[in-house]
Image: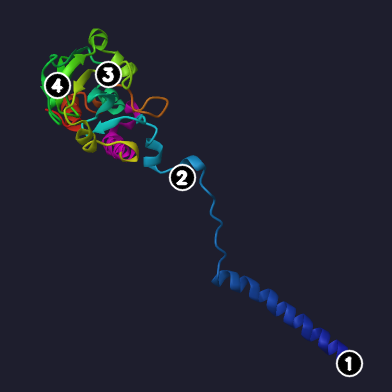
């Protein structure tokens, strides 16, 4: 056997050894499985998905009891309920608004929404004298739900210290973060009955408090609206 033949045999033995080593190496160090990226919709966090549930328009300031104010000048503010409150309670059958000339206090019940034989109290976001109530909304309470930030306003209030009153309220990104927190809390409440509470568009149905608990909906509504 010549020199070249001997080398050829050695080469073949080396190649065979390497071929046998490959499956052993793969058994000891298995390749990492390629992770499939989840669809974009599946990777959106729950809070991010809930950001579209409730409107928080610019230029409005909010009380944690889900009422809003918008300045009209001269210390006069328009007041109404926010999108969360109107969806929570649903279309009211009647409104109980304060008398013109009465004084409302921040965090105290200023008006009530009547529905299903019960009334849900709603707090005032500011302290001041009631100058006017919305007669159109009082005659047609559904306006509160149709246009909560527009034609559905409920009262106009003269506030003696307007700038100070606004400092105690939520606006801009602070209001958006607060509403996200309210939506996240609602998401926890909805978990047992998510199906009937969400409509086809994936947002809470009107009057979702009653869908959550037909018996205790009134208590749930008042707890979330910080009212009595």
| Mark 3 vs mark 4, CA separation in Å | 16 Å
3 or 2: tag closer to the N-terminus: 2
Residue position marked by numbered label 4 in the rendering: 129
Camera-nearest residue between 111 and 159:
159
Please check the rendered image and state whether residue 14 is part of the magenta-colored stretch, yes or no.
no
Secondary structure state at the residue bearing disc 4: strand
Q: Nearer the viewer, mark 3 or mark 2?
A: 3
Classify mark 2: residues with Cα within 10 Å, few (<14), some (14-19) or many (20+).
few
**Vertical comparison of 94 with 71: above or below:** above
Q: Quadrant of the C terminus?
A: top left
Of the numbered discs 3 and 1, the one sitting upstream in the chain is 1
Q: Position of residue 18 (x, y in %)?
A: 69, 77
Q: Residues within 10 Å of mark 1 (few under 14, many from 20)?
A: few
- Residue to which mark 2 is pinned: 43
Question: Does 30 sit left or right of 196 as displayed?
Answer: right
**Label for residue 2?**
1
The reply to whether discs 2 and 1 touch (Cβ–Cβ < 8 Å) is no
Q: Residue at x 26, y 35 (%)?
A: 189
Q: CA distance from mark 1 to mark 4?
A: 115 Å
Q: Quadrant of the N terminus?
A: bottom right
Q: Is residue 15 left or right of residue 181?
A: right
Residues drawn in magenta? 175-197
* Whether residue 52 is situated above or below residue 76 in the rendered picture: below
Task: Tell me which label, 2 or 1, sits earlier in the chain.
Answer: 1
Residue 153 image label? 3
Q: Secondary structure at mark 2?
A: helix
Measure how far apart labels 2 and 4 are at the Cα level: 49 Å
Q: Quadrant of residue 51?
A: top left
Q: Which element type, helix, strand or loop, lies under badge 1?
A: loop
Q: Please tell me which of labels 3 and 4 falls first in the chain.
A: 4
**Dot 4, how many residues are within 10 Å of its Cα: few (below 14), some (14-19), or many (20+)?**
some
At which x and y percent is residue 136?
27, 9
């Amino acid at each position: 056997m010549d020199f070249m033949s001997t080398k050829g045999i050695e080469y073949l033995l080396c190649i065979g050894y390497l071929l046998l080593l490959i499956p052993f190496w793969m058994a000891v160090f298995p390749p990492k499985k390629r992770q499939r990226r989840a669809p974009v919709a599946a990777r959106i966090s729950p809070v991010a998905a809930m950001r579209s549930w409730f409107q928080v328009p610019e230029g409005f300031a909010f009380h944690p009891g889900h009422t809003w104010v918008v300045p009209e000048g001269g210390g006069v503010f328009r007041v109404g309920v926010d999108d969360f409150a109107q969806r929570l309670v649903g279309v009211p059958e009647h409104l109980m608004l304060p008398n013109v000339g009465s004084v409302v206090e921040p965090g105290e019940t200023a008006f009530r929404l009547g529905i299903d034989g019960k009334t849900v109290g709603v707090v005032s976001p500011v302290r001041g004298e009631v100058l006017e109530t919305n007669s159109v909304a009082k005659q047609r309470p559904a306006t509160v739900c149709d246009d909560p930030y527009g034609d559905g306003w409920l009262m106009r209030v003269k506030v003696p210290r307007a700038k100070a009153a606004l400092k105690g309220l939520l606006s801009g990104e602070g209001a958006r973060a607060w509403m996200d927190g309210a939506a996240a809390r609602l998401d926890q409440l909805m978990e047992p009955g998510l199906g009937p509470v969400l409509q086809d568009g994936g947002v809470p149905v009107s009057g979702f408090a009653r869908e959550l608990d037909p018996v205790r909906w009134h208590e749930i509504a008042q707890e979330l609206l910080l009212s009595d």
